[in-house]
Image (cartoon, helix red, strand yellow):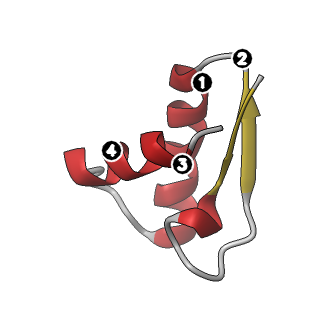
Amino acid sequence: MKKFSCGSVVPGCTATFTADTEGGILEQVAEHACADHGITDVSDELVASVRAHIR
């Protein structure tokens, strides 16, 4: 099981995500980034940062 805490990338955010795969985490995080942070263009740098913090 993979886990990601948004606060690792966006200080103060308490959202956490779990999925069986990294791809599952990235899908959830992309939806969250748009809905809760107003990020509509997910950059390669943001994806790399999220990947670096998936446990």
| Image quadrant where one finds the C terminus | top right
The numbered disc on residue 20 is: 2
Q: Amino acid at mark 3?
A: His
Q: Earlier in the sequence, mark 2 or mark 4?
A: 2
CA gap, disc 3 and disc 1? 14 Å
Residue position for label 3: 53
Image coords of residue 10 (percent x, y): 52, 72
Within 10 Å of the Cα at label 3, are there few (<14), some (14-19), or many (20+) other Cα atoms? some
The kind of secondary structure element at disc 2 is loop
Mark 4, residue position = 48
Query: Dots 2 and 1: beta carbons under 8 Å?
Result: yes
Camera-nearest label, 2 or 3: 3
Q: Nearer the viewer, mark 2 or mark 1?
A: 2
Q: Are marks 4 and 3 in contact (CB under 8 Å)?
A: no
Q: Residue furthest top?
A: 20
Identify whether 27 is placed above or below 1.
Answer: below
Task: Identify the amino acid type marked 4.
Answer: Ala
**Quadrant in the rendering for residue 46:** bottom left
Identify which residue is drawn at 66% across, 74% down.
13
Label 2 – label 3 distance at C-alpha? 15 Å
Q: Position of residue 31 (x, y in %)?
A: 53, 46
Front-lying residue, 52 or 15: 52
Q: Position of residue 41 (x, y in %)?
A: 26, 54
Q: Nearer the viewer, mark 4 or mark 1?
A: 4
